[in-house]
C-alpha cells in the first residue's frame, strides 16, 4: 500500500478523461493535451516541494518519449537517460520505461534496460485506465523504482557517481 506522501502526490496529479491511443488520431490529440497538462502540474508540484527529479519530452506525434531522470543519494546526483514508446494499445497498456545505461545491472530490469513494473505498478495502472497517464507512470512507476534500485546499485558498487568514475 502506498504511504501518505505518495497518496498526496498522486492525488494532486490531474486524472485523464480521454480513453484514446495513438491509432485514434483525433482523440489522441486530446489525450496528449491532457497528458501534457498532467505532466506540467506534476512537475510544478515537484518543484514546489523541492523534489524535481526528471525532464521529459516527446516527438511531434507524442508516441516516443525521452529525457533524463535523476536520483540524489548522499548529496550526489546520479543522472540517467530514459526513454519509452507509447504502446499501440495505450492507455490500456502502460508504457515500458527504459534506462539503457542500467541494462543488465539489476534483476529488476528487462532486456534493453526496461524497468520492471510488473508486480506493483501494472495492476494499479490496469485498475485506473484511462484515468492514469504519463505523470502517474513517473510518480508511481519510475520514481519508486529509482528510490529502491539506485541506492542498492550504489551500495553494491555496480554504479558510481560520475566524479568517482573519473578518479
Image (cartoon, helix red, strand yellow):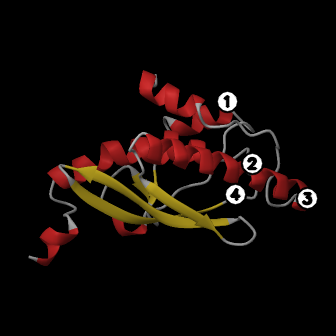
Q: Is residue 163 visible?
A: yes
The C terminus appears in which quarter of the rendering? bottom left
Residue at 75% across, 69% down = 61
Task: Residue 69 in the image: state x and y as whole percent.
Answer: 42, 59
Task: Indicate which disc, 3 or 2, sits on the residue closer to the N terminus.
Answer: 3
Alpha carbon of mark 3 to alpha carbon of mark 1: how far? Answer: 25 Å
Q: Residue furthest left?
A: 167
Q: Helix, strand or loop at disc 4?
A: loop
- For label 3, the crowd category at 10 Å Cα-Cα, with few meaning under 14, some 14 to 19 and many 20 or more, is few
State left or right for residue 119 relative to residue 31.
left
State left or right for residue 17 relative to residue 134.
right
Q: Which residue is mark 3?
A: 26
Q: Is residue 117 visible?
A: no
Q: Which label number is shown at residue 87?
A: 4
Q: Looking at the picture, does residue 115 appear above or below residue 136?
A: below
Alpha carbon of mark 2 to alpha carbon of mark 4: how far? Answer: 17 Å
Residue at 72% across, 36% down = 131
Is the residue under label 1 in contact with that under label 3 (CB below 8 Å)? no
Residue at 45% across, 47% down = 47
Task: Indicate which disc, 2 or 1, sits on the residue closer to the N terminus.
Answer: 2
Task: Indicate which disc, 3 or 1, sits on the residue closer to the N terminus.
Answer: 3
Q: Which residue is mark 2?
A: 34
Q: Helix, strand or loop at disc 3?
A: helix
Amino acid at each position: 500500500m502506498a504511504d501518505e506522501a505518495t497518496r498526496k502526490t498522486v492525488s494532486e496529479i490531474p486524472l485523464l478523461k480521454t480513453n484514446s491511443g495513438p491509432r485514434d488520431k483525433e482523440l489522441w490529440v486530446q489525450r496528449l493535451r491532457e497528458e501534457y497538462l498532467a505532466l506540467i502540474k506534476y512537475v510544478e508540484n515537484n518543484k514546489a516541494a523541492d523534489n524535481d527529479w526528471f525532464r521529459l519530452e516527446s516527438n511531434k506525434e507524442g508516441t516516443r518519449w525521452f529525457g533524463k531522470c535523476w536520483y540524489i543519494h548522499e548529496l550526489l546526483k546520479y543522472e540517467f537517460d530514459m526513454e519509452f514508446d507509447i504502446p499501440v494499445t495505450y492507455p490500456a497498456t502502460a508504457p515500458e520505461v527504459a534506462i539503457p545505461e542500467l541494462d543488465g545491472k539489476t534483476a529488476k530490469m528487462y532486456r534493453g534496460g526496461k524497468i520492471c513494473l510488473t508486480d506493483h505498478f501494472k495492476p494499479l495502472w490496469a485498475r485506473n485506465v484511462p484515468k492514469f497517464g504519463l505523470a502517474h507512470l513517473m510518480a508511481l512507476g519510475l520514481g519508486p523504482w529509482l528510490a529502491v534500485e539506485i541506492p542498492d546499485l550504489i551500495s553494491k558498487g555496480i554504479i558510481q557517481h560520475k566524479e568517482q568514475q573519473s578518479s
